[in-house]
Amino acid sequence: MNIHEYQAKGLLREFGVPVPDGYPVLKAEDAEAAARQLRGPVWVVKSQIHAGGRGKGSFKEAEAGEKGGVRLAKSVDEATAFVRQMLGHTLVTVQTGPAGKQVNRLYIEDGSAIDREFYLSMLVDRETSRIAFVVSTEGGMNIEDVAHDTPEKIKTFSIDPATGIMPLHGRTVAEALGLSGDLAKQTEALVTKLYAAFTAKDMAMLEINPLITTKDGRLRCLDAKISFDDNALYRHPELFNLRDETEEDAKEIEASKYDLAYIALDGTIGCMVNGAGLAMATLDIIQLYGESPANFLDVGGGATEEKVTAAFKIITADPKVKGILVNIFGGIMKCDVIARGVIAAVKAVGLQVPLVVRLEGTNVEEGKEIIRSSGLNVIPADDLDDAAQKIVAAVRKG
Protein backbone atom coordinates (compact mmCIF):
# COMPACT_ATOMS: atom_id res chain seq x y z
CA MET A 1 0.00 0.00 0.00
CA ASN A 2 1.28 3.45 -0.94
CA ILE A 3 0.52 6.73 0.80
CA HIS A 4 0.85 10.39 -0.12
CA GLU A 5 3.87 12.55 0.65
CA TYR A 6 2.11 14.59 3.34
CA GLN A 7 0.96 11.39 5.05
CA ALA A 8 4.48 9.94 4.89
CA LYS A 9 5.92 13.11 6.45
CA GLY A 10 3.31 13.06 9.17
CA LEU A 11 4.25 9.49 10.01
CA LEU A 12 7.99 10.26 10.00
CA ARG A 13 7.38 13.29 12.21
CA GLU A 14 6.00 10.92 14.87
CA PHE A 15 9.46 9.31 15.02
CA GLY A 16 11.27 12.64 15.33
CA VAL A 17 12.44 12.79 11.71
CA PRO A 18 13.09 16.41 10.61
CA VAL A 19 10.61 17.44 7.91
CA PRO A 20 9.37 20.92 6.91
CA ASP A 21 6.05 22.13 8.31
CA GLY A 22 3.10 21.83 5.97
CA TYR A 23 -0.64 21.32 5.66
CA PRO A 24 -2.73 19.25 3.25
CA VAL A 25 -5.40 21.00 1.18
CA LEU A 26 -8.37 19.04 -0.13
CA LYS A 27 -10.59 22.02 -0.95
CA ALA A 28 -9.49 25.23 -2.68
CA GLU A 29 -11.24 27.41 -0.10
CA ASP A 30 -8.93 26.00 2.61
CA ALA A 31 -5.72 27.05 0.84
CA GLU A 32 -5.37 30.55 2.27
CA ALA A 33 -5.82 29.42 5.89
CA ALA A 34 -3.26 26.65 5.39
CA ALA A 35 -0.70 28.99 3.85
CA ARG A 36 -1.11 31.59 6.61
CA GLN A 37 -0.17 29.01 9.23
CA LEU A 38 3.30 28.74 7.68
CA ARG A 39 6.16 31.20 8.15
CA GLY A 40 7.08 31.92 4.55
CA PRO A 41 8.45 33.95 2.83
CA VAL A 42 8.43 31.03 0.37
CA TRP A 43 5.68 28.43 0.15
CA VAL A 44 5.83 25.18 -1.85
CA VAL A 45 2.57 23.90 -3.37
CA LYS A 46 2.83 20.19 -4.16
CA SER A 47 0.44 17.95 -6.08
CA GLN A 48 -0.31 14.77 -4.13
CA ILE A 49 -0.50 11.78 -6.46
CA HIS A 50 1.05 8.33 -6.25
CA ALA A 51 3.65 8.97 -8.95
CA GLY A 52 7.11 10.46 -9.23
CA GLY A 53 8.30 13.27 -11.48
CA ARG A 54 5.65 15.71 -10.26
CA GLY A 55 7.88 18.76 -10.53
CA LYS A 56 8.64 18.08 -14.19
CA GLY A 57 5.09 17.00 -15.02
CA SER A 58 2.53 18.99 -16.96
CA PHE A 59 -1.20 19.43 -16.67
CA LYS A 60 -3.57 18.47 -19.46
CA GLU A 61 -5.84 21.45 -18.87
CA ALA A 62 -4.64 24.89 -19.98
CA GLU A 63 -6.20 26.64 -16.98
CA ALA A 64 -3.92 24.65 -14.66
CA GLY A 65 -0.89 26.61 -15.87
CA GLU A 66 2.48 25.46 -17.16
CA LYS A 67 4.65 25.29 -14.05
CA GLY A 68 4.37 21.58 -13.27
CA GLY A 69 2.98 19.78 -10.27
CA VAL A 70 5.33 21.37 -7.69
CA ARG A 71 5.40 25.18 -7.55
CA LEU A 72 7.17 27.85 -5.49
CA ALA A 73 5.00 30.73 -4.28
CA LYS A 74 6.33 33.99 -2.84
CA SER A 75 3.11 35.09 -1.18
CA VAL A 76 -0.01 33.63 0.38
CA ASP A 77 -2.05 34.95 -2.54
CA GLU A 78 0.20 33.24 -5.07
CA ALA A 79 0.07 29.96 -3.15
CA THR A 80 -3.72 30.19 -3.07
CA ALA A 81 -3.81 30.88 -6.80
CA PHE A 82 -1.65 27.84 -7.51
CA VAL A 83 -4.01 25.65 -5.48
CA ARG A 84 -7.00 26.85 -7.49
CA GLN A 85 -5.14 26.19 -10.74
CA MET A 86 -3.97 22.68 -9.87
CA LEU A 87 -6.71 21.10 -7.77
CA GLY A 88 -9.01 18.83 -9.74
CA HIS A 89 -6.86 18.87 -12.88
CA THR A 90 -4.94 16.00 -14.51
CA LEU A 91 -1.18 15.86 -14.03
CA VAL A 92 0.93 13.86 -16.48
CA THR A 93 4.39 12.68 -15.38
CA VAL A 94 6.90 10.10 -16.58
CA GLN A 95 5.36 7.61 -14.14
CA THR A 96 1.64 8.23 -14.73
CA GLY A 97 1.70 7.51 -18.45
CA PRO A 98 -0.15 9.69 -20.96
CA ALA A 99 -3.47 9.30 -19.14
CA GLY A 100 -2.10 11.15 -16.11
CA LYS A 101 -3.72 11.33 -12.67
CA GLN A 102 -6.24 13.77 -11.32
CA VAL A 103 -4.92 15.92 -8.48
CA ASN A 104 -7.44 15.62 -5.64
CA ARG A 105 -5.08 16.69 -2.85
CA LEU A 106 -2.38 19.31 -2.50
CA TYR A 107 0.23 20.01 0.16
CA ILE A 108 1.38 23.51 1.10
CA GLU A 109 4.77 23.42 2.78
CA ASP A 110 7.32 25.86 4.15
CA GLY A 111 10.08 26.59 1.67
CA SER A 112 13.63 25.55 2.55
CA ALA A 113 16.93 27.30 1.88
CA ILE A 114 18.68 24.38 0.19
CA ASP A 115 22.45 24.09 0.39
CA ARG A 116 23.00 20.48 -0.83
CA GLU A 117 20.73 17.66 -2.02
CA PHE A 118 21.16 13.92 -1.41
CA TYR A 119 19.32 10.68 -2.01
CA LEU A 120 18.46 8.17 0.74
CA SER A 121 16.18 5.16 0.67
CA MET A 122 15.49 1.99 2.61
CA LEU A 123 14.06 -1.25 1.28
CA VAL A 124 13.92 -4.96 1.95
CA ASP A 125 16.78 -6.64 0.10
CA ARG A 126 15.38 -9.99 -1.05
CA GLU A 127 18.84 -11.42 -1.71
CA THR A 128 20.06 -10.92 1.85
CA SER A 129 16.65 -10.91 3.62
CA ARG A 130 17.76 -7.72 5.35
CA ILE A 131 16.81 -4.07 5.40
CA ALA A 132 19.15 -2.17 3.11
CA PHE A 133 20.10 1.50 2.83
CA VAL A 134 20.76 3.13 -0.55
CA VAL A 135 22.44 6.54 -0.43
CA SER A 136 23.88 8.90 -3.00
CA THR A 137 25.24 12.42 -3.26
CA GLU A 138 23.08 12.87 -6.36
CA GLY A 139 19.82 13.97 -4.75
CA GLY A 140 16.87 15.43 -6.60
CA MET A 141 17.48 13.12 -9.58
CA ASN A 142 15.97 9.82 -10.65
CA ILE A 143 18.06 7.21 -8.88
CA GLU A 144 17.67 4.95 -11.94
CA ASP A 145 19.53 7.53 -14.03
CA VAL A 146 22.29 7.78 -11.44
CA ALA A 147 22.61 3.99 -11.33
CA HIS A 148 22.93 3.89 -15.11
CA ASP A 149 25.26 6.85 -15.65
CA THR A 150 27.35 7.07 -12.47
CA PRO A 151 26.85 3.90 -10.40
CA GLU A 152 29.96 4.67 -8.36
CA LYS A 153 28.02 7.51 -6.72
CA ILE A 154 25.60 5.07 -5.07
CA LYS A 155 26.46 3.26 -1.83
CA THR A 156 24.35 0.40 -0.46
CA PHE A 157 24.64 -1.62 2.72
CA SER A 158 22.34 -3.81 4.78
CA ILE A 159 21.55 -4.07 8.48
CA ASP A 160 22.13 -7.32 10.33
CA PRO A 161 18.87 -8.04 12.18
CA ALA A 162 20.87 -9.60 15.01
CA THR A 163 22.37 -6.21 15.89
CA GLY A 164 19.83 -3.83 14.45
CA ILE A 165 20.78 -0.25 13.69
CA MET A 166 24.09 0.90 15.20
CA PRO A 167 26.06 4.18 15.28
CA LEU A 168 28.44 2.86 12.62
CA HIS A 169 25.56 2.74 10.13
CA GLY A 170 24.88 6.42 10.63
CA ARG A 171 28.58 7.17 10.22
CA THR A 172 28.60 5.11 7.02
CA VAL A 173 25.80 7.25 5.57
CA ALA A 174 27.47 10.49 6.65
CA GLU A 175 30.76 9.44 5.09
CA ALA A 176 29.05 8.42 1.84
CA LEU A 177 27.37 11.83 1.65
CA GLY A 178 30.53 13.74 2.58
CA LEU A 179 29.07 15.14 5.80
CA SER A 180 31.15 15.90 8.87
CA GLY A 181 30.92 17.66 12.21
CA ASP A 182 27.44 18.48 13.45
CA LEU A 183 25.84 17.36 10.16
CA ALA A 184 27.40 13.93 10.63
CA LYS A 185 25.87 13.74 14.12
CA GLN A 186 22.48 14.75 12.67
CA THR A 187 22.87 12.02 10.05
CA GLU A 188 23.52 9.37 12.71
CA ALA A 189 20.38 10.43 14.56
CA LEU A 190 18.34 10.51 11.34
CA VAL A 191 19.40 7.01 10.28
CA THR A 192 18.38 5.62 13.67
CA LYS A 193 14.97 7.29 13.51
CA LEU A 194 14.31 6.13 9.94
CA TYR A 195 15.19 2.55 10.83
CA ALA A 196 12.85 2.71 13.82
CA ALA A 197 10.00 3.97 11.64
CA PHE A 198 10.69 1.41 8.92
CA THR A 199 10.61 -1.57 11.24
CA ALA A 200 7.80 -0.35 13.51
CA LYS A 201 5.42 0.21 10.60
CA ASP A 202 6.44 -2.79 8.45
CA MET A 203 7.45 -0.64 5.51
CA ALA A 204 8.46 -2.19 2.22
CA MET A 205 10.14 0.97 0.90
CA LEU A 206 11.05 4.41 2.24
CA GLU A 207 12.53 6.94 -0.17
CA ILE A 208 13.71 10.46 0.64
CA ASN A 209 14.62 12.38 -2.49
CA PRO A 210 15.95 14.85 -1.79
CA LEU A 211 17.40 14.74 1.66
CA ILE A 212 18.86 18.22 2.08
CA THR A 213 21.17 20.30 4.18
CA THR A 214 19.94 23.85 4.68
CA LYS A 215 22.09 26.96 4.55
CA ASP A 216 21.90 27.21 8.35
CA GLY A 217 23.33 23.70 8.77
CA ARG A 218 20.28 21.52 9.35
CA LEU A 219 19.34 18.17 7.83
CA ARG A 220 15.81 17.88 6.41
CA CYS A 221 13.72 15.35 4.52
CA LEU A 222 12.30 17.48 1.72
CA ASP A 223 10.28 14.68 0.15
CA ALA A 224 9.12 11.28 1.38
CA LYS A 225 7.64 8.27 -0.34
CA ILE A 226 6.50 5.24 1.67
CA SER A 227 4.97 1.91 0.74
CA PHE A 228 3.94 -0.76 3.23
CA ASP A 229 4.08 -4.56 3.16
CA ASP A 230 0.46 -5.51 2.39
CA ASN A 231 0.91 -8.82 4.20
CA ALA A 232 1.65 -6.99 7.46
CA LEU A 233 -1.15 -4.44 7.36
CA TYR A 234 -3.30 -6.54 9.69
CA ARG A 235 -0.88 -5.46 12.43
CA HIS A 236 -1.45 -1.77 11.67
CA PRO A 237 -5.16 -0.95 11.47
CA GLU A 238 -4.27 2.75 11.86
CA LEU A 239 -2.62 2.70 8.43
CA PHE A 240 -5.84 1.77 6.62
CA ASN A 241 -7.07 5.31 7.22
CA LEU A 242 -4.20 6.58 5.05
CA ARG A 243 -5.30 4.62 2.00
CA ASP A 244 -6.47 6.75 -0.94
CA GLU A 245 -8.55 4.47 -3.14
CA THR A 246 -8.86 7.16 -5.85
CA GLU A 247 -5.16 6.49 -6.57
CA GLU A 248 -5.75 2.77 -7.13
CA ASP A 249 -7.36 0.72 -9.87
CA ALA A 250 -10.96 -0.06 -8.90
CA LYS A 251 -10.56 -3.65 -10.09
CA GLU A 252 -7.50 -4.14 -7.90
CA ILE A 253 -9.41 -2.78 -4.91
CA GLU A 254 -12.26 -5.21 -5.55
CA ALA A 255 -9.79 -8.10 -5.93
CA SER A 256 -8.18 -7.30 -2.59
CA LYS A 257 -11.55 -7.82 -0.87
CA TYR A 258 -11.42 -11.49 -1.93
CA ASP A 259 -7.69 -11.94 -1.31
CA LEU A 260 -7.01 -12.25 -5.04
CA ALA A 261 -3.63 -11.31 -6.50
CA TYR A 262 -4.72 -9.03 -9.35
CA ILE A 263 -2.77 -6.48 -11.38
CA ALA A 264 -4.34 -4.63 -14.30
CA LEU A 265 -2.35 -4.62 -17.56
CA ASP A 266 -2.91 -3.02 -20.95
CA GLY A 267 -3.73 -6.02 -23.17
CA THR A 268 -6.94 -7.60 -24.46
CA ILE A 269 -6.88 -11.17 -23.08
CA GLY A 270 -8.14 -11.61 -19.54
CA CYS A 271 -6.42 -14.36 -17.55
CA MET A 272 -7.51 -16.38 -14.54
CA VAL A 273 -4.81 -18.74 -13.31
CA ASN A 274 -3.86 -20.46 -10.05
CA GLY A 275 -0.29 -20.02 -8.92
CA ALA A 276 2.02 -17.08 -9.61
CA GLY A 277 4.48 -19.11 -11.69
CA LEU A 278 1.78 -20.56 -13.93
CA ALA A 279 0.21 -17.10 -14.23
CA MET A 280 3.51 -15.62 -15.43
CA ALA A 281 3.95 -18.45 -17.92
CA THR A 282 0.42 -17.83 -19.19
CA LEU A 283 1.13 -14.13 -19.71
CA ASP A 284 4.37 -14.95 -21.52
CA ILE A 285 2.84 -17.45 -23.93
CA ILE A 286 -0.01 -15.07 -24.83
CA GLN A 287 2.67 -12.50 -25.69
CA LEU A 288 4.58 -15.15 -27.65
CA TYR A 289 1.58 -15.70 -29.94
CA GLY A 290 1.21 -12.01 -30.67
CA GLU A 291 -1.39 -10.69 -28.20
CA SER A 292 -1.11 -9.05 -24.78
CA PRO A 293 -2.64 -10.01 -21.41
CA ALA A 294 -5.17 -7.66 -19.84
CA ASN A 295 -4.27 -8.67 -16.30
CA PHE A 296 -2.31 -10.84 -13.93
CA LEU A 297 -4.75 -12.77 -11.76
CA ASP A 298 -3.73 -15.55 -9.39
CA VAL A 299 -6.74 -17.06 -7.60
CA GLY A 300 -4.42 -19.01 -5.30
CA GLY A 301 -4.22 -22.63 -4.31
CA GLY A 302 -7.21 -22.69 -1.99
CA ALA A 303 -9.72 -20.53 -3.82
CA THR A 304 -13.42 -21.07 -3.16
CA GLU A 305 -16.25 -20.93 -5.67
CA GLU A 306 -17.03 -17.46 -4.36
CA LYS A 307 -13.47 -16.24 -5.05
CA VAL A 308 -13.48 -17.72 -8.54
CA THR A 309 -16.81 -16.04 -9.29
CA ALA A 310 -15.45 -12.72 -8.02
CA ALA A 311 -12.31 -13.13 -10.14
CA PHE A 312 -14.34 -13.77 -13.28
CA LYS A 313 -16.51 -10.72 -12.63
CA ILE A 314 -13.43 -8.53 -12.18
CA ILE A 315 -12.00 -9.72 -15.50
CA THR A 316 -15.23 -9.13 -17.42
CA ALA A 317 -15.58 -5.64 -15.89
CA ASP A 318 -12.54 -4.53 -17.90
CA PRO A 319 -13.79 -3.03 -21.19
CA LYS A 320 -10.45 -3.80 -22.88
CA VAL A 321 -10.94 -7.56 -22.51
CA LYS A 322 -11.75 -9.20 -25.86
CA GLY A 323 -11.28 -12.79 -24.71
CA ILE A 324 -10.69 -14.80 -21.52
CA LEU A 325 -8.30 -17.65 -20.79
CA VAL A 326 -8.85 -19.80 -17.70
CA ASN A 327 -5.75 -21.90 -17.04
CA ILE A 328 -5.94 -24.12 -13.96
CA PHE A 329 -3.61 -26.84 -12.75
CA GLY A 330 -5.39 -28.43 -9.82
CA GLY A 331 -3.19 -29.44 -6.93
CA ILE A 332 -4.67 -28.04 -3.76
CA MET A 333 -7.14 -26.23 -5.99
CA LYS A 334 -9.77 -28.59 -7.42
CA CYS A 335 -10.80 -28.31 -11.05
CA ASP A 336 -14.48 -28.88 -10.28
CA VAL A 337 -14.48 -25.87 -7.92
CA ILE A 338 -13.02 -23.71 -10.68
CA ALA A 339 -15.58 -25.02 -13.16
CA ARG A 340 -18.52 -24.26 -10.88
CA GLY A 341 -17.15 -20.79 -10.18
CA VAL A 342 -16.76 -20.03 -13.88
CA ILE A 343 -20.28 -21.26 -14.64
CA ALA A 344 -21.76 -19.21 -11.78
CA ALA A 345 -19.92 -16.09 -12.91
CA VAL A 346 -20.91 -16.46 -16.55
CA LYS A 347 -24.54 -16.87 -15.57
CA ALA A 348 -24.31 -13.83 -13.31
CA VAL A 349 -22.61 -11.40 -15.69
CA GLY A 350 -23.13 -12.98 -19.10
CA LEU A 351 -20.45 -13.94 -21.58
CA GLN A 352 -19.83 -11.45 -24.38
CA VAL A 353 -16.32 -12.55 -25.39
CA PRO A 354 -14.64 -15.87 -26.30
CA LEU A 355 -13.71 -18.10 -23.34
CA VAL A 356 -11.01 -20.78 -23.45
CA VAL A 357 -10.70 -23.14 -20.48
CA ARG A 358 -7.76 -25.44 -19.79
CA LEU A 359 -8.10 -27.69 -16.75
CA GLU A 360 -5.62 -30.25 -15.45
CA GLY A 361 -5.06 -31.98 -12.13
CA THR A 362 -7.30 -32.83 -9.18
CA ASN A 363 -10.90 -33.64 -10.18
CA VAL A 364 -10.16 -32.63 -13.78
CA GLU A 365 -12.77 -34.95 -15.32
CA GLU A 366 -15.46 -33.66 -12.98
CA GLY A 367 -14.51 -30.10 -13.89
CA LYS A 368 -14.62 -30.77 -17.62
CA GLU A 369 -18.00 -32.48 -17.30
CA ILE A 370 -19.43 -29.51 -15.40
CA ILE A 371 -18.39 -27.19 -18.22
CA ARG A 372 -19.54 -29.56 -20.99
CA SER A 373 -22.99 -29.94 -19.46
CA SER A 374 -23.39 -26.21 -18.77
CA GLY A 375 -24.52 -25.41 -22.29
CA LEU A 376 -22.07 -22.50 -22.45
CA ASN A 377 -20.06 -21.70 -25.55
CA VAL A 378 -16.69 -22.56 -24.01
CA ILE A 379 -13.63 -23.56 -26.03
CA PRO A 380 -11.78 -26.45 -24.33
CA ALA A 381 -7.99 -26.74 -24.47
CA ASP A 382 -5.68 -29.69 -23.82
CA ASP A 383 -2.59 -27.85 -22.58
CA LEU A 384 -1.18 -24.33 -22.13
CA ASP A 385 0.19 -24.04 -25.65
CA ASP A 386 -3.10 -25.19 -27.14
CA ALA A 387 -5.04 -22.81 -24.87
CA ALA A 388 -2.91 -19.79 -25.80
CA GLN A 389 -3.22 -20.43 -29.53
CA LYS A 390 -6.98 -20.88 -29.28
CA ILE A 391 -7.67 -17.70 -27.31
CA VAL A 392 -5.41 -15.62 -29.56
CA ALA A 393 -7.17 -16.99 -32.65
CA ALA A 394 -10.60 -16.37 -31.12
CA VAL A 395 -9.74 -12.76 -30.22
CA ARG A 396 -8.37 -12.03 -33.69
CA LYS A 397 -11.40 -13.61 -35.31
CA GLY A 398 -13.44 -11.51 -32.97
Image: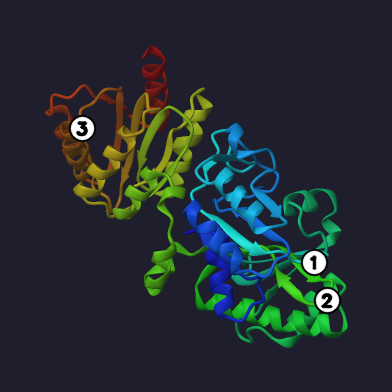
Q: Residue at x 78, y 64 (%)?
A: 118
From the image, state whether disc 3 or disc 1 is nearer to you.
1
Instruction: Give the quarter of the image for residue 176.
Output: bottom right
User: Which residue is denoted by mark 3 in the rendering?
Assistant: 349
Badge 3 element = helix
| Disc 2 residue type (three-letter) | Asp
Sequence order check, earlier mark of 2 and 3:
2
In front: 15, or 42?
Answer: 42
In front: 33, or 318?
Answer: 33
Residue 81, image x and y in percent?
61, 48
From the image, state whether disc 2 or disc 3 is nearer to you.
2
Residue 182, image x and y in percent?
83, 85
User: Which residue is denoted by mark 1 in the rendering?
Assistant: 113
User: Which residue is denoted by mark 2 in the rendering?
Assistant: 216
Q: Residue furthest front?
A: 77
User: Please, is residue 187 above or below residue 132 in the view?
Assistant: below
Q: Residue at x 65, y 72 (%)?
A: 19
